[in-house]
């Protein structure tokens, strides 16, 4: 067997063997943390936050939600909406961005977009 096909097979096996977790995005209730929103959905995926506005736009489109305006945001509870306008990005690393965001709550007029493990617990 030549070296190139063997390497290709080894790479394919490594990729296929890696566990993947599909993210299920849920729009939470007013003032709810993503820990609460995702509690019955296998938990909140702390490493699944959108890294670009385009990724966030795809999330809201998949949820059937329309943001009438989108800004970077920068709050620990982002991505979120007030029902009309959206903030997509959490804080930068120098402003606490490395801290967990799943437990953060917004105020009573803030609805978070949350990355959950499953659609609903069976």
Image (spheres, rainbow, N blue to C red):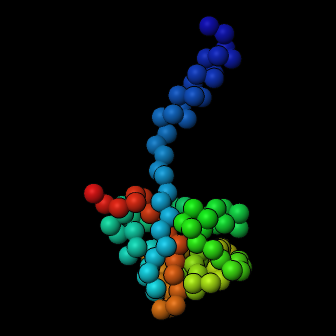
Q: Is residue 117 left or right of residue 83?
A: left
Q: Classify residue 48 by image quadrant.
A: bottom right
What residue is shown at x 38% (from left), y 76% (from top)? 36
* Quarter of the rendering occupied by the N terminus: top right
**Number of numbered discs present?**
0
Q: Where residue 17 appears, x then y in whole percent?
A: 48, 34
Is any atom of residue 80 visible in this view?
yes
What residue is shown at x 61% (from left), y 65% (from top)? 61
The residue at the far top in this view is 1
What residue is shown at x 52% (from left), y 90% (from top)? 109
Asked if residue 80 is positioned above or below residue 23 in the image, the reply reads below
Q: Nearer the viewer, residue 57 or 89?
A: 57
Q: Where residue 5 appears, x then y in whole percent?
A: 64, 16
The residue at the far left in this view is 122
Q: Where residue 71 appears, x then y in whole percent?
A: 72, 79
* Quarter of the rendering occupied by the C terminus: bottom left
Q: Is residue 32 left or right of residue 49?
A: left
Q: Classify residue 56 by image quadrant.
A: bottom right
Is any atom of residue 87 visible in this view?
no
Q: Where residue 115 appears, x then y in whole percent?
A: 49, 65
The residue at the far bottom in this view is 108
What residue is shown at x 57% (from left), y 84% (from top)? 83
Q: Is residue 110 left or right of residue 118?
A: right
């Amino acid at each position: 067997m030549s070296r190139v096909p063997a390497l290709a097979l080894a790479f394919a096996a490594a990729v296929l063997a890696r566990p993947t977790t599909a993210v299920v995005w849920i729009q939470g209730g007013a003032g709810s943390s993503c820990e609460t929103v995702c509690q019955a959905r296998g938990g909140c995926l702390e490493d699944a936050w959108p890294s670009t506005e385009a990724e966030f736009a795809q999330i809201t489109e998949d949820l059937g939600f329309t943001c009438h305006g989108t800004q970077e945001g920068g709050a620990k509870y982002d991505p979120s909406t007030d029902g009309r306008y959206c903030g997509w990005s959490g804080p930068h690393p120098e402003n606490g961005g490395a801290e967990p965001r799943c437990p953060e709550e917004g105020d009573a007029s803030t609805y978070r977009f949350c990355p959950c493990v499953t659609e609903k617990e069976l």
